[in-house]
Amino acid sequence: MLQCLSIKPRHRPRLRVVGDHVPMVDVFITCAGEETEVILDTLRAAAAVDWPRDRMRIVVLDDKKSDEVRREVELIGLKNSSIHYSARTKIKGMPHHFKAGNLNGGLKYVSTLEGEKAEYIAALDADMIVESFWLRAIISHLITEPQLALACPPQLFYNVPKNDPLYQNLALFFGILEAVKDSIESAWCTGSGYAIRRSALDQIGGFPTGSVAEDVYCSNLLLGAGWKTCYVHEPLQWGTVPDSFSGHIKQRARWTIGTVQTSAKLNFFLYGRICRGMSFLHRFCGFVFTLGTISTVSSTASLLMFPIVLVSGYRLVAYADNDQLKWLIRLAFFSLFINRINEFIAFTPVGYRFAWRGNLGTLWMAPYHAVAIVRSFVLPSWLGGAMASFASSGSIDSVINERDARDRAPLVRRLRVILLNGGVLIHVMYILFTAGAVASSLVRTFTTTADTWQDRLFYVLTHAGWPPLVWLVASVACTVPIKYAVDPPAMPDREDLLQRDKDTLIAHPTEGAKRARWGKSNLLHEGFYVLITAYTTAIFFGSWFVK
């Protein structure tokens, strides 16, 4: 639906602030238990950006109050007076508001510093290494457009494994969806690397609390207040994805909960004072994305219905007569054909392989999103309902070190942790249940009262063989986390992915680490999709010859 509204693409020019007569900027680096060296790499890169040192202040906001982080930051600060360390006081029993509370603590801290009040606030996650031209690229858009409150770049990653088995690259989200939202002037904050106009932030009362997705909440409050936001589609920062299955699941569950929390706060973008300044497209965009998130519950239920219907002996498609069945087959073909054309065209900017991997990721991740929503917003506490606790992605350690080829846990322990603790057992059960349902349906083909080959063919087509074999696509998607548990990708140490200056210790990802890497196994996914397409095409042509 959003694609239909964004036929005219948004081509934002690449702007740069030039010279030393620049506005004052406060840069916040939020951390909450990440490795000290990861935080320091982000700090060193931020301190080395091409921006006059007397026109910026960098504040490390440490929500874990680490003595080691404080010592190292203060040591670097001895050579750079623009670097500061701050750790807010958190009173036990009082709400801390997670990252939003940490950022608001940063606002309070800079208000105590001497000197000029910053016109802009920029924020970085603890693991995001910025390019030297980051501020000159981001701030330029805010300077040239006075009504613009927020400018945000994509999050890019340098530690994505070969073939990206869990779909952690997020190329579709940052390369397609965010650009589409920007084309209808509904860009959302991407969580790191962004810059925000301080006057606009003060107008909405600082960084909003009440949602673990404070970035999405903040950008929508700005839109509701009549400000504009933009998406700067440039490679300006490079970070890390969770290096464990459990970290990946927890991160995505947090995003899901945050999206629903934010939408609920905004009355699902439908009405209220808080949405008063939003246009129809702003509201429509927010509602559609929320609907897409919540629909994972119904998607999970619908995937379960396929094997249930098959094992019950019912048809997967309803029709009145054979002529109607033939036209339904043709419509199924046209639907698949148009969808494939759309994939080739729409996903060209990021690469077609990401599209197919993203589709698989959507299917096997659906149960996790659904469980997160049901537990957080539906079930009472006595039935297991609970809001997921916040933990930054970089602070989640793996108990099995599955991506360390030298130190990973044995196969049996990996299977126990990922299948049982990680919930992948449900994917195994789904595959077995579906296989049994399909087998029983095929056996039933020869035990029914059908006498002719055409009757048996129609029985198969309307049951297990209905194109495009959605049950098979879902089953293949469910093998992704199972394969990951059996054969996880091996990744080098983080240091091997960086190019570090021996004198300054400033590190940036190598060019090889920035690029997506694909192996031959990736062709299996596309080969499977080709077979599904060929099968549907064959059924389509056959429908013209069968009476």
Image (cartoon, rainbow, N blue to C red):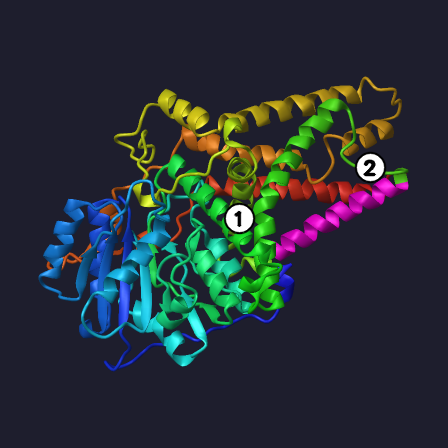
Where disc 1 sits, the SS reads: helix
Q: Which residue is mark 1?
A: 260
Residue lying farthest to the top in this orientation: 447
Q: Label for residue 373?
A: none
164 shown above or below 276: above
At x 65% / y 40%, what residue is drawn? Answer: 532
User: In the visual, does 397 lie left or right of 55?
Assistant: right
Q: Nearer the viewer, residue 94 or 247?
A: 94
Classified by dominant secondary structure, the portion drawn in magenta counts as helix
Is residue 458 left or right of 136 when viewed as pictured?
Answer: right
Q: Is residue 219 left or right of residue 87?
A: right
Q: Amino acid at mark 2?
A: Ala
Instruction: Report if residue 357 lies within the magenta region.
Output: no
Image location (x, y in percent) of residue 134: 31, 67
Q: Is residue 377 left or right of residue 508?
A: right
| Label 2 vs label 1, nearer the camera | 1
Q: Which residues are magenta?
A: 323-343
Q: Can the viewer see residue 492 in this picture?
A: yes
Return the x and y of residue 269 as percentages of the image width and height.
59, 58
Residue type, label 1: Val
User: Is label 2 in contact with label 1 (beta carbons under 8 Å)?
Assistant: no
Is label 2 in a helix, a strand or a loop? loop
Residue 413: percent from the left, percent from the top?
36, 22
Residue at 73%, 28% (x, y): give it: 309
Q: Is residue 345 visible?
A: no
| Count of numbered tags | 2
* Residue pictured at 15% horizontal, 46% vertical: 68
Mark sitting earlier along the chain (2/1): 1
The residue where tag 2 is placed is: 318
Residue 241 position (above or below residue 155)? above
Q: In the picture, residue 284 is in which quadrant?
A: bottom right
Give the position of the C terminus as an image quadrant.
top right
